[in-house]
Amino acid sequence: MKEIKCVCGHVNPNGTVLCEACGRALTDEAMSEKLHDMRYEGSARRSQTYNKSIIDKIWNFFSSVKVGVWLILLTLIASAAGTILPQEQYIPNGQPADEYYGDVYGFFGEIYYALGFHDLYSSWWYLLLIASIGISLVIASLDRFVPLYRSLKNQRVARHIGFLERQRIYGRTDIVINDDTMGKLKESFGLKKYHVREEDGNILAEKNRFSRWGPYVNHIGLIIFLFGGMLRFVPGMYIDETVWIREGETRAVPGTDQEYYLENKGFILETYDKDKDKEVFGEAIDKNGTIAKNFQSDVILYKESGDRIPGQKAERTIEQEDSIKVNHPLKFGNFAVYQTSYKLDEFKSMSFTFDQKESGETFGEFTVDLFDPQDEYVFEDGYKAELMGYYPDFSGFNEQGEPQTKSPLPNNPAFLFKLFSPEKPEGEISFVGGIKISVS
């Protein structure tokens, strides 16, 4: 690395504009300046000195403030785009994301899913943007921190006259200063909270030096924040999952490797009374019908014990019995389970009978699980119902006459069956949304 030796004898790193010791200009450009740039007092910045190797080019790219600003803008735009539709973790009932976005939001939902916005904040390219901002902050800070540190560390009291003349504020007065005058001058600076240094009859008065480190203190805070934010994507460091558990159901707690299970023994909903709470909630009750006062789930937490044997159900022991309310989670180990929402009067299943329309004779009865329907339902004597289509939230027919569903929730279930009987072995199509199937 080429070094620059000043007339004063100080050896400066390659790229130095002003001597670190005396402030003398070392380049033709610096000599021709009317004012010196005093941000780093002429110390060498790596990004403005080296540009040969691939490492130099990467360093120079990320050290640019413009690049950092663009990375932040791109991240902000991407973050905003991720809020247009619900993220994958908030899809109800565990429906596959590739089906949900197309079914509910149509073509736009398919594009949204294809571009990866359905799981934006965990996607590789979003994490790459966050990491790039962090890298930019680190490199930009180091590129400027080191020169500033060197300039302040090597700062001397005596300076070359050319350095002084090229300051933004410069004045010159010819007076005779004796020891008494020098003492009064130093005392005056001291009273104004200046840090005074004297060297060979020269005085340097300085205060608020730490303010020059302000941007880098900011950068360090941002780097720590970004690092902490990215720790959530390290396996085991952060878990934020949603699980729907209906009354009577038992589900594995996400993130516990199926070690813990949660059973919903019952759900309780309390609402404000219009007469008792009229003064505070009367207007809101008139407007919305009911206002929830408390909703909670009474749950049992199980823990699997012993070795897991394929094909056999592991033994579970009760760890806790508690009620989960809003802002009062069930806590165990490093986990906390919150009650975030509820849904009342949800369809779970629908029952149908296979009847002869003319005689009213029943050949079979079957029940369709609205969350896990079977493909076909077989009865005696050659009767069978084949489920060709299921529309959980039927919203009508499209221009081609095909049934549509507006959501994966069973709010208005409809079915497309193909019915087989000895009289009609080739089958016949029946679209139903009720509870009874009849054939002629």
Image (cartoon, grey):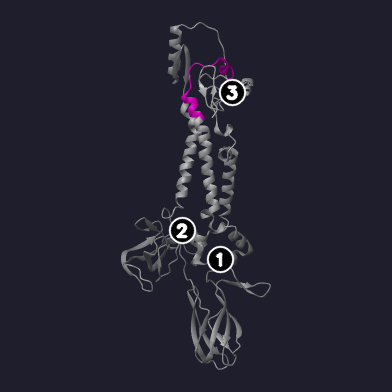
Q: Nearer the viewer, residue 388 or 314?
A: 314
Q: Earlier in the sequence, mark 1 or mark 2?
A: 1
Image quadrant in which you'd find residue 52: top right
Q: How far across and how far down the image is residue 201, in percent? A: 47, 11
**Residue beneath the point at 35% across and 71% down:** 309
Q: The residue under label 1 is which amino acid type?
A: Tyr
Label of residue 36 in the image? 3
Label of residue 241 in the image? none
Q: Nearer the viewer, residue 230 or 420?
A: 230
Residue marked by disc 2: 281
Residue marked by disc 1: 100
In this rendering, which labeled residue sits more in front, label 3 or label 2?
A: 3
Q: Residues within 10 Å of mark 3 (few under 14, many from 20)?
A: many
**Does the residue at mark 1 contact the one at mark 2 (Cβ under 8 Å)?**
no
Q: How far across and how far down the image is residue 240, in percent? A: 45, 57
Q: Which residues are magenta?
A: 147-168
Number of numbered labels in the structure image: 3
Q: Earlier in the sequence, mark 3 or mark 2?
A: 3
